[in-house]
Image: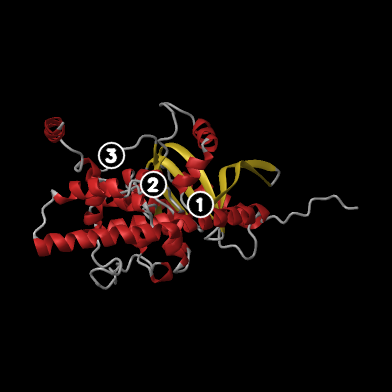
Amino acid sequence: MNNMDTTPSHYPGLLAEIRRRIRQGQARAILAVNQELLALYWDIGCLIDARQKSEGWGAAVIPRLAKDLHNELPEEKGFSERNIKLMVQFYREYPTLFVSETIGQPAVAQLPDSVSPPEKGQPVLAQIPWAHNVLLMQRVKDRGVRLWYAEATLANGWSRNVLQMQIETAAHTRQGKATSNFALRLPPPQSDLVQQALKDPYLFDFLTLEEPFRERELETGLIAHLEKFLLELGQGFAFVGRQYHVDIGDQDFYIDLLFYHLHLRCYIVIELKRGKFKPEYAGKMNFYCSVVDDMLRHESDAPTIGLILCQQQNAVIAEYALRGVDKPIGVSTFDLTRALPTELESSLPSIEQIERELGGDQAGV
């Protein structure tokens, strides 16, 4: 009996893809259950808003409503004063998100062209949980940006904590920002898809490295925190190997990190570099991509992509360096600390606001 391993070379990628789909399916089942609750909250907000406008109700009715609901329906959760106020805000933010049985308003939400149509005809914001919507209302002012995060939540199955991290690191401003030669080396629309799969900068604030550090220390830290590393890389990256050995012309070469992208259907070579980007990095990456194309790439795979991650880069120098190479290569930077985005920094309360709120709370005790 032949005991030789007959596992196909792409089996790890298949396993990773099935595992990803199972997790996405589980996440989507949870989201579907939450849609009914979301529609209820929207409808309550719609009803209260209509009464406030038609009968002149003031804000004081909401605390009483919360108290009476608690007394009459003690087993029901989610109807605190704060949550009811959020329901009203939710309706006012998206007055056409659902059809209200009480008010009878149509539900036709218009999404910008950059956001793909939601599944099953339901607006994308109606498909993410209440806690995610509250977070988006409170932390993201621009509605187009909210839709970007909502769609990314659906695509990636982000939890609320992961969504908050993505907002705090301004993920929408980093996606697709890598310097690259993709438009010159790949046909459309593949060049656009590859560009959007990469970002700049990458944030590795989950590491505890201190300057000066060696590239091997950075590499070791990323693999030690592989789950967080993959989350930062984005959807579709499957880890193949670290210091991946290739034997060329009786010489040994070692690729820092090798991945396979499940959506782009290609290998991605990542080289980690301390300090500034240097033009010679492009030549070495071009060599590695050629080797992977010849030795690992299946005939059905797309061309191998190279990604050079360095601490600093000059876009003009990187563009010149990439223009003369044959393989599709991107250059991005990485940061080891998280900087607070300006749009979030401006939304933080001042000392005076905090003192006023604390004073108001004490007065009401």
Which callout, 3 or 1, points to the residue nearer the camera?
3
| Residue type beneath disc 2 | Arg
240 to the left or right of 132: right
| Residue type beneath disc 1 | Gly
Answer above or below: position of 272 versus 180. Answer: above
User: Measured from the top left, where is residue 82 in percent x and y?
Assistant: 24, 45
Which of 76/300 is in front? 76
Answer above or below: position of 11 versus 218. Answer: below
Answer above or below: position of 62 versus 216. Answer: below
User: Measured from the top left, where is residue 208 in percent x and y?
Assistant: 44, 29
Query: How far apart are the alpha carbons under marks 2 and 3?
Result: 19 Å
User: Marks 3 and 2: in contact by CB < 8 Å?
Assistant: no
On the rendered image, what quadrant is the C terminus found in?
top left
Q: Locate residue 250: give its quadrant.
A: top right
Residue 139 visible in the current orientation: no
Q: Which mark is residue 340?
A: 3
Per the image, label 2 sits on a secondary structure element best described as helix
User: Measured from the top left, where is residue 114 in percent x and y?
Assistant: 33, 65
Q: Earlier in the sequence, mark 1 or mark 2?
A: 2
Q: Which residue is at a point 29% across and 71% down the rendered structure image?
A: 107
Q: Earlier in the sequence, mark 2 or mark 3?
A: 2
Which callout, 2 or 3, points to the residue nearer the camera?
2
Q: Which residue is disc 2 drawn over?
A: 160
| Residue type beneath disc 3 | Leu
